[in-house]
Image (spheres, rainbow, N blue to C red):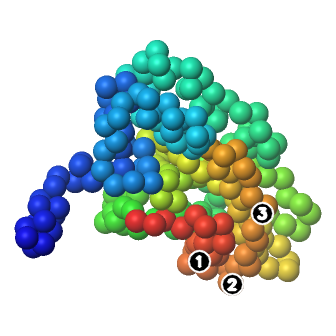
């Protein structure tokens, strides 16, 4: 009997094991703290939306994507768009973008630092998807060069490709700086939770040598300190 139960569980389709809900008669994945699909309907969706800002945005985002936002859930989805929050622009330089750094070590190291295992490295000559917006950061001193960047991460801490509207699909936004001067180089990262609206203090990691792999390693270490390494 136990073997039959195990086989029956294994035979369930993957969608049945998703952490999902039925809201507005639409099946949406909300990565909830359960296994399977919550079929309780709008009453359960409203309860989840009232209990957690993070869950509310997941529900509202899923319904908007499906074009299925109904009148019962609409009142809970009026303030779930963090890109409209002025606090997200808490680094003034964030408003100004620039082209990738001309320095090959800086450009390659920044790219590699957000090259998560969620997608296999694509063979040459196909380039991996772009995951960074480059920002203009004024140097702190005349003898320093500063490269700024911004990336969006999903719920598993994995960097989102820019062409997939990351600001709509992200749970975290990460700002970073790569600073190089006479005393060495360092990477600085800070992140913002787009559901809880909390911003971390900057994490600074020294770059052990000026090359692509060292820069990437420092970024990954900084992401680990922030708890934002890709978990896939």
Query: Between disc 3 and disc 1, whose residue precedes?
Result: 3
The residue at which mark 2 appears reads as 208
Of 174 and 201, nearer the camera is 201
The residue where tag 3 is placed is 202
Q: Which mark is first along the chain, 3 or 2? A: 3
Specify whether residue 231 is in view.
Answer: yes
Q: Secondary structure at mark 3?
A: loop
Instruction: State the SS at label 1.
Output: helix
Point out the image quarter for the N terminus. bottom left
**What's the residue at 45%, 33% (across, down)?**
45
How far apart marks 2 and 3 lie (CA) works out to: 19 Å
Q: Are marks 2 and 3 in contact (CB under 8 Å)?
A: no
Query: In this view of the protein, can residue 135 be seen by the observer?
Result: no
Q: What separation in Å lies between label 2 and label 1 (alpha carbons)?
A: 9 Å
Q: Are marks 2 and 1 in contact (CB under 8 Å)?
A: yes
Q: Which residue is mark 1?
A: 217
Q: Position of residue 33 (x, y in %)?
A: 45, 54
Q: Is residue 43 left or right of residue 189?
A: left
For label 2, the crowd category at 10 Å Cα-Cα, with few meaning under 14, some 14 to 19 and many 20 or more, is: some
């Amino acid at each position: 009997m136990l073997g039959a139960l195990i086989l029956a569980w294994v035979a369930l389709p993957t969608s049945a094991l998703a952490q999902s809900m039925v809201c507005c008669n639409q099946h949406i994945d909300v990565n909830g703290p359960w296994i399977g699909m919550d079929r309780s309907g709008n009453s359960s969706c409203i309860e989840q939306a009232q209990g957690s800002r993070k869950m509310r945005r997941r529900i509202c985002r899923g319904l908007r994507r499906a074009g299925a936002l109904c009148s019962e859930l609409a009142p809970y989805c009026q303030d779930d768009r963090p890109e409209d929050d002025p606090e997200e622009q808490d680094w003034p330089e964030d408003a100004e973008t620039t082209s990738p750094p001309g320095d090959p070590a800086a450009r390659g190291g920044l790219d590699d630092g957000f090259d998560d295992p969620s997608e296999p490295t694509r063979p040459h000559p196909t380039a991996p998807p772009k995951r960074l917006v480059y920002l203009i950061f004024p140097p702190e001193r005349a003898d320093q060069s500063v490269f700024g960047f911004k990336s969006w991460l999903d719920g598993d801490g994995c960097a989102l490709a820019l062409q997939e509207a990351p600001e709509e699909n992200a749970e975290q936004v990460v700002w970073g700086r790569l600073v190089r001067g006479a005393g060495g180089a360092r990477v600085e990262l800070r992140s913002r939770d787009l559901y809880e609206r909390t911003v971390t203090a900057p994490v600074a990691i020294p770059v052990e040598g000026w090359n692509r792999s060292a820069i990437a390693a420092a970024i990954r270490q900084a992401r680990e300190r922030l708890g934002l390494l890709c978990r896939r």
